Image (cartoon, helix red, strand yellow):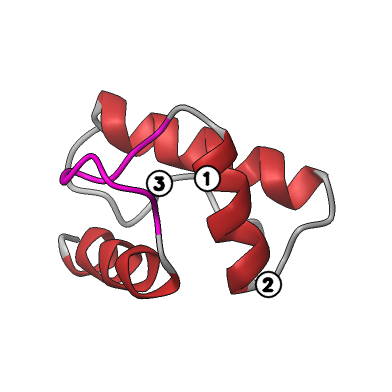
Amino acid sequence: MSLYVEPHQARTRPPNSYERAMAAELEASFGRQVHDLPGLVTALNAGGLRPASGADWTEESLTAELARLGEGE
């Protein structure tokens, strides 16, 4: 029995390109020691990933999107 968490162990399907891009943006932000919601919003807006509306990310839109992505599994 493995004591380590396996990446995507709870997934029922492979991540799509949008989910991979979102993960890459967030992981890059964490790597730059950005761990708070306002900082993540700023980092996402500086990057190329936009919400479906095409507008800038806000704290509300990022929170809603993360919740949406999390409930899919």
- Report the residue marked by disc 3: 8
Secondary structure found at label 3: loop
Magenta stretch in the rendered image = 49-57
Q: Which mark is residue 52?
A: none
The picture places residue 59, in percent across and down from the top left corner, at 44, 72
Q: Which mark is residue 36?
A: 2
Tag 1 or tag 2, which sits nearer the N-term? 2
Q: Is residue 50 magenta?
A: yes
Where is residue 28 shown, x and y percent of the image? 68, 38
Asked whether disc 3 touches disc 1, contact meaning CB atoms under 8 Å apart, the reply is no
- The mark lying in front, picked from 3 and 2, is 2
Q: Nearer the viewer, residue 47 or 14?
A: 47
Height in image: 33 above or below 18? below
- What is the chief secondary structure element of the magenta stretch? loop
Residue 69, compared with residue 25, is above or below; it is below
Q: Give the class, few, some or many, for how many residues have Cα within 10 Å of label 2's Cα (few <14, many ≥20).
A: few
Q: Which amino acid type is marked by label 2? A: Asp
To which residue does mark 1 refer? 44
15 and 9: which is toward the camera: 15
In three-dimensional space, the C-alpha distance between marks 3 and 2, rounded to whole angstroms, equals 23 Å
The amino acid type, in three-letter code, at marker 1 is Leu
Say whether disc 3 or disc 2 marks the residue closer to the N-terminus: 3
Q: Amino acid at mark 3?
A: His
CA gap between label 3 and label 1 equals 23 Å
